[in-house]
Image (tube, rainbow, N blue to C red):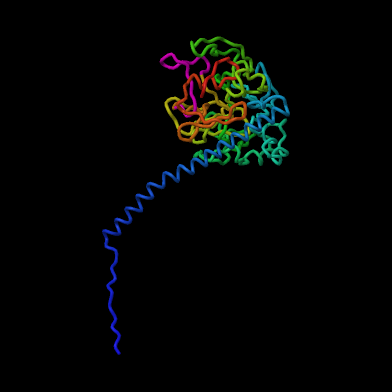
Amino acid sequence: MKVLRLKVARRAFTLIELLVVIAIIAILISLLLPAVQQAREAARRTQCKNNLKQLGLALHNYHDVHRRLPAGYFSYPTSNGAAPAWAQLDPNTWDGAPGWSWGAMLLPFLDQGNITNSVDFDRPVWTTQHRDVLSTKLPVFLCPTSSGGDDAFTVQGADGSPRLINGQPVVVGRSHYVASHGQESCWGECGSATTGIVFSNIYTSATRTVAINGDAGRVADGPFYRNSGTRFRDVTDGLTNTVFLGEHSSKLSDKTWVGVVPGASTPPRFRSPENGPDAAATMVLVHAGPSGGELDITGFPIIHPVNFPTFHVGQMYSEHMGGGHVSLGDGSVRFISENIDLLLWAELSSMNEGEVIGEF
């Protein structure tokens, strides 16, 4: 018996059908990709917020133990520019040894006992014994959104070349977080000035002259400055209304958790008509403005909140869309819009100017 076998024709995709399928896949990917990117950025923002939360809690623990906050950075105290040779005092700024910053002083409260035990805080940052630990990468000081890198960097001098001390370059670990000096700034030439001009009223642009003589605290109106020892009771504007810490992406300039090296400079990684290199103190500190009695071309005090397009190395700067995180004095972390009212930002940055702060 013969079995009849039917032949079934096999039909393949036509070129047009294949192109349609590819187009549909491309559309789906284009729709899904932004959602995936947003989800990743949301996770990065959460991590960044958590880092600042840990740093804020560490500040509170430090205050509980020492009855004061750590200094913005520690420097040899002088009122006339005189100091022993070992202090390596910068004649232009009066910055000198030991140089350790607020970030380094928090190490015992950030579960970094191994590093703490390797450091002698009474000796300068750049001492040979510290060379191996200075370049340590500490995740708590790194925002995952920052695109400027998270590796250690070589400290630069004012001319852009490596800053050499005792013939050796100084390499320090990176930080994407900085401490607030307040509205005013006192670094660079201010650090060694006899007197300075500060704003007495930011709403009327009124100014006054103050004596400095090496004491940055006579200018600074924020919680962190050279040789500061701020106590919570000094924050009369209220801990909830005062910015302590914030972001500064290394896309703009290099910051460190280690400290300040005298004679160093902080150059911007990209230039704008308004930015340029600044003094060594901006390796760990920023300010909000207004400062030094400076006014813009309209006569308004110069204030630069998060991501302000002046791109100063001494301002807060974040790569999060729309603004950046700050840690307030009460330990809470808030996301501050880059479109925040300028005067409100100045009010949040000072700790004892008596401004009345509403919702933000």
**Chain part drawn in magenta:** 290-308
| Residue closest to the eye, 298 or 164 | 298
The reply to whether the magenta stretch includes residue 292 is yes
| Residue closest to the eye, 70 or 18 | 18
Quadrant into which the N terminus falls: bottom left
Q: Quadrant of residue 226?
A: top right
| Residue closest to the eye, 338 or 292 | 338
Q: Is residue 237 visible?
A: yes
Q: Position of residue 332 (x, y in %)?
A: 59, 30
Give left or right: position of 143 versus 20. Answer: right
**In the current view of this chain or complex, which residue is farthest to the front?**
1
Q: Position of residue 219 (x, y in %)?
A: 59, 16
Classified by dominant secondary structure, the portion drawn in magenta counts as loop
Q: Is residue 165 visible?
A: no
Q: Position of residue 336 (x, y in %)?
A: 50, 29
The reply to whether the magenta stretch includes residue 269 is no
